[in-house]
Amino acid sequence: RVWEYVKLRVRETGLRAIASANRSFDLSAFLNGSQAAYKMILEAYWSGDKAELAGLCDDDVYASFAEAIDARTEKGETLENRLVRIDNAQIVEASLRGRLAHVTVRLDADIAAVTRDKDGHIVGGTMTDAVATHDLWTFSREIGSANPNWKLSETDEAE
């Protein structure tokens, strides 16, 4: 219980620091944007669209996604995944380090996923049963940047 209070205070302090440094920061708009980015990034990854990913992710996250796409392509596998719904999007951490703002969002979603081999045969998953996923995605943005977009800078599974 004490730990939850500490985490809440740290998150609130981080959000206040970001809002103070960036007067146009809107929490509701950020959460809506994080959900839209989640969908766009997942769909780009699933379809192997590295150009789209490059614009949405920082260099490290992009490199990880590109490596996984290349490995999948080399094996001749394709993904037929679909984001069924996002059940919850909640900011769990926020900080401002220098001029770099970081906001971590927990995204609870249902995803239907199928992997096909080079011959089109299903090697994993099903489109009829969505799987509950729980992700922690951190978005970052330099305060004062001419580019208003946040980039995905870290991904992790939530507990």
Image (cartoon, rainbow, N blue to C red):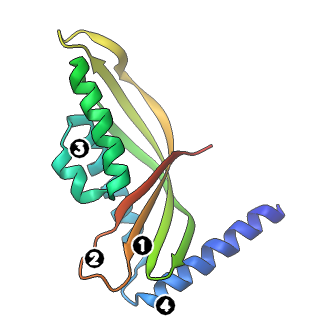
The residue labelled by disc 4 is 20
Q: Amino acid at mark 4?
A: Ser
Left or right: 72, with 131 as reference point = left
**According to the image, label 1 marks what residue?**
28
Residue at 57 percent across and 77 percent down: it is: 14
Disc 3 crowd rating (10 Å Cα; few below 14, some 14-19, many 20+) is some
Q: CA distance from mark 2 to mark 4?
A: 16 Å
- Can residue 79 be seen in this snapshot? no
- Between circles 4 and 1, the one closer to the viewer is 4
Q: Observer-nearest residue: 57 or 32?
A: 57
Q: Considering only order in the chain, which callout, 3 or 2, is on the residue closer to the N terminus?
A: 3
118 or 60, which is in the foreground? 60
**Chain-order first, disc 4 or disc 1:** 4
Q: Earlier in the sequence, mark 2 or mark 4?
A: 4
Q: Secondary structure at mark 2?
A: loop
Residue at (49%, 67%) from the top-left corner?
103
Describe the element under mark 3 as helix, strand or loop.
helix
**Is mark 2 in CB contact (under 8 Å) with mark 3?**
no
Mark 2 sits on what residue?
A: 148
Residue 121 is situated, as x and y percent measured from the top left of the image, at 24, 9
Q: Is residue 17 above or below residue 30?
A: below
Given the image, on which type of amino acid does mark 2 rest? Pro
The residue that disc 3 covers is 44
**Counting residues from the N terminus, which is met first, the one under dot 1 or under dot 3?**
1
Nearer the observer: mark 1 or 3; the answer is 3
